């Protein structure tokens, strides 16, 4: 797509094109190929401030000043050519640099090069270009490597590994998962990820995908407001919520090549709302494990802290970072506390507007896992179809779900569940949230540990008798949440408490 856009610009007579990309070598490779195909020319000129202008074989003396380099380009008599200026556009934003003269010379070149069939490319990773030439310049964001490009790279590694005699235990589906895992990385980043994850391993298995996700973690660490979660959870770690689980399982392969070939639209996100402590945050972590995609949490408190600049700038940069590491899960916990139309400051309203547009328009394989306790604080436009694929209401667990929760947490603490009357424990904890049940087991375990014995059923009875659940202290608020969710959200649970 990027090359097609460049072709269209050149065919329309455009002589100044700004290309935004971190991948200098890859862009140079594609431009060289385009020059050969379009003009049957092998000559590309390159400029950088340290060396000046290079005609493909040697540097031209006294051309470190871009004005002099452009003058040579204007005098060049070859019938066509591409002139690639590396990192010139950031200099045009530097007050110590004579940007006025360079901008004037670029405007001269815009007109004069049209008659010569030549194009100047401003190649850099930044998005700045001066107002003086914004009417004369086309701006093209060079796409990251697509699936086929990364697939070719992966199979080069596989062929090399096979020739070295190492064992490869990957079926066709697992090989595709490796390619999907590096989607969103630059070509060099994907190469490095494959090197780190595959090269020194005696046996190549699907488990090595976790090492690729670690490479994506490095990109996130540079951003500052995004947190990478390494712990994996499965559906077995979540009690109840059958409707939500079924919905997630049906979309397990949503970001696979098969789903794309089938013509399926990729899911955009899910909003889990409901009562605190009932599994909303755990759901986001489970999606990551079930779909085998990296999970990143956006910390809205850090966005508003001012540590990285204005909140709206930090927020937009975080979303662009997420676009670059796709496919991935973006977890926004308690979304109403950071993105709401009930907040009075202008930064919040700008963030809301930017986020709504991004949710609707972004094409990267990012799935939003958002949670909310007070969904009434969210604007109506965020809840309409097209933003989130589904809104689930997570209520207090039913009797059957409480039994599942007791089983999960008792087993995770190494207890023999045959020593516990699970149905009775579920009965006496009616109205409890999942986190309250978990904490009761932890507290009872400490009591047993202090007495140097194993956890017993009576320990849980004593703890439950001394606990006032959230459903009692926040009864009115819970009724309000249930009232809002009625006919507005899908119940996450299949069961109903009678």
Image (cartoon, rainbow, N blue to C red):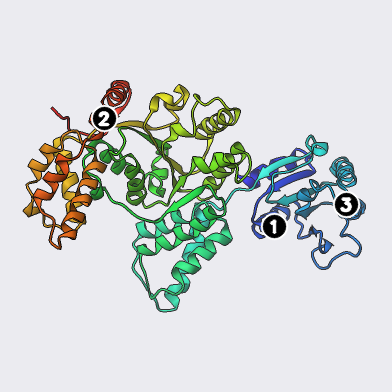
| Cα–Cα span, label 2 and label 3 | 74 Å
Q: Residue at x 52, y 46 (%)?
A: 322
Q: Which residue is mark 2?
A: 473
Q: Which mark is residue 28?
A: 1
Q: Quadrant of the C terminus?
A: top left
Q: Quadrant of the N terminus?
A: top right
Q: Which residue is mark 3?
A: 70
Which SS class for mark 1? Answer: helix
Circle 2 crowding by C-alpha within 10 Å: few under 14, some 14–19, many from 20: few
Query: Measured along the vertical axis of the image, is residue 164 above or below residue 213?
Result: below
Q: Are marks 2 and 3 in contact (CB under 8 Å)?
A: no
Q: Is residue 278 left or right of residue 448?
A: right
Q: Earlier in the sequence, mark 2 or mark 3?
A: 3
Q: State which mark lies toward you, 2 or 1.
A: 2
Q: Are marks 2 and 1 in contact (CB under 8 Å)?
A: no
Q: Residue at x 46, y 24 (%)?
A: 379
| Cα–Cα span, label 2 and label 1 | 64 Å
Q: Is residue 187 left or right of residue 7?
A: left
Query: Measured along the vertical axis of the image, is residue 338 above or below residue 295?
Result: above
- Would you say residue 325 is visible in this rendering? yes
Q: How many marks overall?
A: 3
């Amino acid at each position: 797509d990027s090359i097609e856009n460049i072709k269209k610009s050149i065919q329309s007579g455009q002589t100044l094109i700004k290309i935004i990309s971190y991948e200098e070598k890859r862009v140079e490779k594609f431009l060289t190929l385009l020059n050969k195909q379009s003009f049957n020319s092998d000559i590309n000129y390159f400029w950088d401030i340290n060396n000046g202008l290079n005609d493909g074989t040697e540097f031209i003396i006294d051309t470190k000043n871009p004005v002099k380099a452009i003058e040579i380009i204007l005098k060049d008599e070859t019938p066509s050519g591409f002139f690639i200026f590396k990192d010139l556009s950031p200099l045009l934003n530097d007050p110590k640099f004579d940007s006025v003269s360079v901008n004037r010379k670029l405007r001269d070149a815009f007109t004069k090069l049209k008659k010569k069939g030549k194009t100047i490319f401003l190649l850099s990773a930044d998005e700045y270009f001066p107002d003086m030439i914004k009417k004369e310049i086309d701006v093209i964001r060079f796409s990251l490597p697509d699936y086929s490009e990364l697939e070719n790279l992966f199979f080069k590694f596989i062929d090399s590994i096979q020739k070295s005699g190492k064992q490869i235990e990957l079926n066709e589906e697992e090989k595709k998962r490796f390619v999907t895992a590096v989607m969103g990385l630059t070509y060099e980043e994907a190469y490095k990820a494959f090197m780190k994850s595959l090269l020194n391993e005696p046996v190549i298995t699907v488990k090595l995908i976790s090492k690729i996700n670690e490479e994506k973690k490095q990109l996130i660490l540079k951003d500052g407001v995004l947190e990478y979660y390494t712990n994996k959870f499965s559906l077995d770690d979540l009690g109840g919520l059958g409707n939500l689980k079924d919905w997630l399982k049906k979309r397990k392969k949503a970001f696979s090549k098969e789903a794309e070939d089938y013509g399926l639209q990729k899911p955009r996100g899910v909003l889990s709302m409901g009562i605190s402590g009932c599994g909303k945050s755990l759901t986001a972590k489970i999606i990551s494990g079930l779909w085998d995609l990296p999970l990143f949490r956006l910390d809205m408190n850090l966005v508003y802290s001012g540590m990285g600049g204005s909140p709206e700038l930090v927020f937009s940069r975080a979303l662009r970072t997420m676009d670059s590491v796709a496919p991935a899960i973006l977890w926004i916990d308690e979304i109403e506390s950071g993105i709401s139309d009930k907040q009075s400051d202008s930064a919040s309203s700008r963030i809301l507007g930017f986020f709504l547009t991004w949710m609707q328009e972004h094409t990267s394989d990012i799935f939003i896992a958002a949670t909310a306790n007070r969904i009434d604080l969210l604007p109506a436009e965020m809840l309409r179809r097209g933003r989130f694929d589904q809104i689930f209401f997570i209520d207090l667990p039913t009797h059957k779900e409480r039994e599942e929760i007791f089983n999960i947490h008792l087993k995770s603490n190494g207890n023999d569940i045959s020593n516990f009357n699970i149905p009775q424990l579920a009965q006496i904890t009616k109205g409890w949230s999942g986190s309250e049940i978990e904490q009761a087991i932890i507290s009872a375990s400490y009591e047993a540990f202090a007495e140097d014995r194993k956890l017993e059923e009576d320990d849980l009875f004593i703890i439950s008798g001394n606990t006032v659940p959230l459903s009692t202290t926040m009864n009115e608020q819970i009724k309000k949440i249930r009232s809002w969710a009625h006919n507005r959200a899908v119940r996450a649970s299949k069961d109903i408490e009678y």
